[in-house]
């Protein structure tokens, strides 16, 4: 799932925390970071926090309900 123009990073992280299964960030190089881990969140978003906006990010979920939560986040902001 590709998320674009994410302006509210805090709300995205809270949405991810509410997910039940594994949620991973996929980098352009194909690396995967477990976004349920605080350390991985810091490593993954260190560049983003300087800009306060995520232009594009790819996230993979292991649970269909978690994918729906992220879609609702993107629709409702």
Image (cartoon, rainbow, N blue to C red):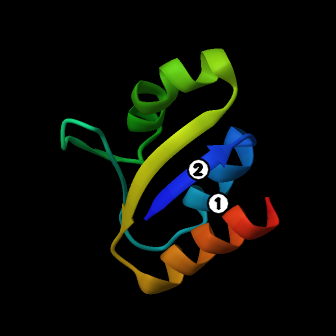
Which residue is rendered at x = 43% and y = 65% of the image?
1
Give the farthest residue toward the left. 30
Q: How many marks?
A: 2
Secondary structure, mark 1, is: helix
Crowd rating for badge 2 (residues with CA inside 10 Å; few <14, some 14–19, many 20+): few
Which residue is rendered at x = 50% and y = 19% of the image?
47
Q: Position of residue 51 (x, y in %)?
A: 65, 19
Determine which residue is flagged by label 1.
Answer: 15
Establish if 18 lies above or below 24. below
Give the farthest residue toward the top. 50
Which residue is rendered at x = 46% and y = 46% of the image?
57
Determine which residue is flagged by label 2.
Answer: 4
Give the farthest residue toward the right. 76
- Between residue 71 and residue 65, name the one nearer to us: 71
**Residue 50 shows in this picture:** yes
Of labels 2 and 1, earlier in sequence is: 2
Secondary structure, mark 2, is: strand
Q: Position of residue 69 (x, y in %)?
A: 62, 74
**Residue 36 shows in this picture:** no
Q: Position of residue 16 (x, y in %)?
A: 56, 58
Left or right: where 38 falls relative to 33: right
Alpha carbon distance from label 2 to label 1 = 15 Å
Which residue is rendered at x = 36% and y = 65% of the image?
22
Establish if 40 lies above or below 71. above
Viewport quadrant of the C terminus: bottom right
Q: Position of residue 39 (x, y in %)?
A: 41, 32
Establish if 30 lies above or below 66. above
Crowd rating for badge 1 (residues with CA inside 10 Å; few <14, some 14–19, many 20+): some
Front disc: 2 or 1:
2
């Amino acid at each position: 799932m590709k998320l674009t123009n994410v302006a509210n990073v805090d709300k995205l992280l809270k949405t991810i925390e509410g997910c039940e299964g594994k949620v991973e960030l996929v980098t352009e190089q194909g690396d995967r970071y477990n976004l349920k881990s605080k350390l991985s969140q810091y490593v993954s978003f260190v560049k983003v926090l300087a800009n306060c906006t995520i232009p594009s990010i790819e996230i993979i979920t292991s649970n269909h309900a978690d994918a729906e939560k992220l879609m609702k986040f993107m629709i409702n902001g």
